[in-house]
Image (cartoon, rainbow, N blue to C red):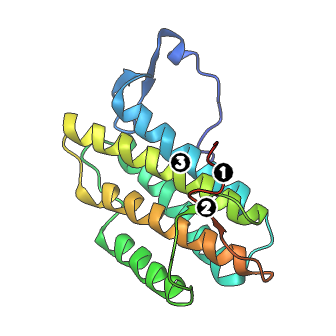
């Protein structure tokens, strides 16, 4: 691979615009750039999660997801271009089914927390939901494919399940919401 970025500070964005992958320019506060930024932030948070001690299968899935999110950012950066497909969504569906099958049924809502890795997975989950909202907003303003929206929706679900899995790695459990226990009297 050649030198893709030899100059980082181009100063072309000093006017409040940024370049898209097709060569066009758009405002840095546009819906498209917000969606790209949220996907990028999600990818960064997954990078933090990957610094934790994780089961090999979880590590492999999260690494693949990081590559998918980079592709998704590329797709969002080039209007009309497709990189994330139904096959990506189906892979998430399979991981979701596989990991969820080994978990006990939920009896109550879960609070974000438990182990450090699980807490980070919950942060990733909430950032994924924000990325999903940004992609939905972009899709209302411009034509984009369905797969990107479906992908981040499913990814958020998977991250919830992975948080539960990670809480059990060393024999821990979920942190359950206790409806009446903390209500002021």
Q: Which residue reaches farthest front?
A: 185
Q: Residue at x 32, y 61 (%)?
A: 150
Instruction: For residue 1, say whether it is visible.
Output: no
Q: Residues within 10 Å of mark 2 (few under 14, many from 20)?
A: few
**Looking at the picture, how far across and down is residue 116, in whole percent?**
78, 61
Quadrant of the drawing holding the N terminus? bottom right
Give the SS element for disc 2. loop
**Looking at the picture, how far across and down is residue 120, in whole percent?**
69, 57
**Looking at the picture, how far across and down is residue 129, in whole percent?**
45, 50
Q: Residue at x 35, y 77 (%)?
A: 90
**Looking at the picture, how far across and down is residue 19, in whole percent?**
43, 28
> Mark number for residue 178?
2
Q: Residue at x 32, y 55 (%)?
A: 149
**Residue under circle 3?**
127
Give the SS element for disc 1. loop
Q: Are marks 1 and 2 in contact (CB under 8 Å)?
A: yes
Viewer-closest of 163 and 175: 175
Instruction: For residue 7, say whether it is visible.
Output: yes
Q: Is residue 29 above or below residue 172?
A: above
Q: Residues within 10 Å of mark 1 (few under 14, many from 20)?
A: few
**Residue under circle 1?**
182
């Amino acid at each position: 691979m050649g030198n893709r970025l030899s100059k980082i500070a181009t100063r072309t964005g000093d006017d409040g615009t940024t370049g898209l992958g097709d060569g066009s320019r758009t405002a840095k506060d546009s819906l498209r750039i917000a969606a790209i930024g949220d996907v990028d932030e999600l990818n960064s948070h997954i990078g933090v999660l990957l610094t934790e001690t994780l089961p090999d299968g979880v590590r492999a899935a999260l690494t693949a997801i990081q590559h998918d999110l980079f592709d998704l950012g590329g797709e969002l950066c080039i209007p009309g271009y497709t990189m994330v497909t139904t096959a990506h969504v189906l892979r998430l569906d399979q991981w979701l089914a596989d990991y969820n099958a080994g978990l006990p049924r939920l009896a109550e809502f879960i609070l974000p927390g438990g182990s450090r890795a699980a807490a980070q997975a919950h942060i990733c989950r909430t950032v994924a939901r924000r990325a999903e909202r940004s992609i939905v907003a972009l899709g209302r303003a411009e034509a984009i494919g369905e797969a990107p929206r479906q992908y981040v929706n499913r990814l958020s679900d998977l991250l919830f399940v992975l948080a539960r899995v990670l809480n059990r790695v060393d024999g821990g459990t979920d942190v359950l919401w206790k409806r009446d226990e903390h209500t002021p009297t």
